[in-house]
Image (spheres, rainbow, N blue to C red):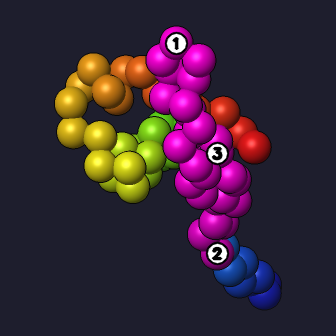
Amino acid sequence: METATIHIFPTRKTEYEWEVIRLRCRGEYLGTVKAADEDAALQAAVKMFALKTTSAQKQLLIRRA
């Protein structure tokens, strides 16, 4: 009896562009980041735009571009 060999390769998550907006009275467009999901986009935005305080991080709006 022959056996078949199945090769399973890890799938790569596609990265999307996410718009980063700081919510203030009018909303301030900061730029875009590339990430696979919203949580990763938020972490990338915090790192990219050097947002150190938690209040600044809570004022971010992340949406797919």
Which quadrant: the C terminus? top right
Q: Is residue 57 toward the left or the right of residue 7 in the image?
A: left
Task: Name the kind of residue labelled 2 in the image.
Answer: Phe
Q: Residues within 10 Å of mark 3 (few under 14, many from 20)?
A: many
Q: Is residue 8 toward the left or the right of residue 41 in the image?
A: right
Residue that sits furthest to the top in the current view:
25
Residue that sits furthest to the front in the current view:
26
Tell me the residue that label 3 is attached to: 18
Provide the secondary structure element on which disc 2 rests: loop
Tell me the residue that label 2 is attached to: 9
Front in this rendered view, residue 18 or 15: 18
Front in this rendered view, residue 55 or 34: 55
Gap between marks 3 and 2 measured at Cα: 27 Å
Tell me the residue that label 1 is attached to: 25
Q: Residues within 10 Å of mark 2 (few under 14, many from 20)?
A: few
| Residue 22 appears anywhere in the view | yes
Which quadrant: the N terminus? bottom right
* Residue 34 x %, y %: 59, 57
* Label located before the other in sequence (1 or 3): 3
Task: Name the kind of residue labelled 3 in the image.
Answer: Trp
The answer to whether the residue labelled 3 contacts the one labelled 2, judged by CB atoms less than 8 Å apart, is: no
Q: What residue is shown at x 50% (from left), y 20% (from top)?
A: 23
Task: Name the kind of residue labelled 1 in the image.
Answer: Cys
* Label located before the other in sequence (2 or 1): 2
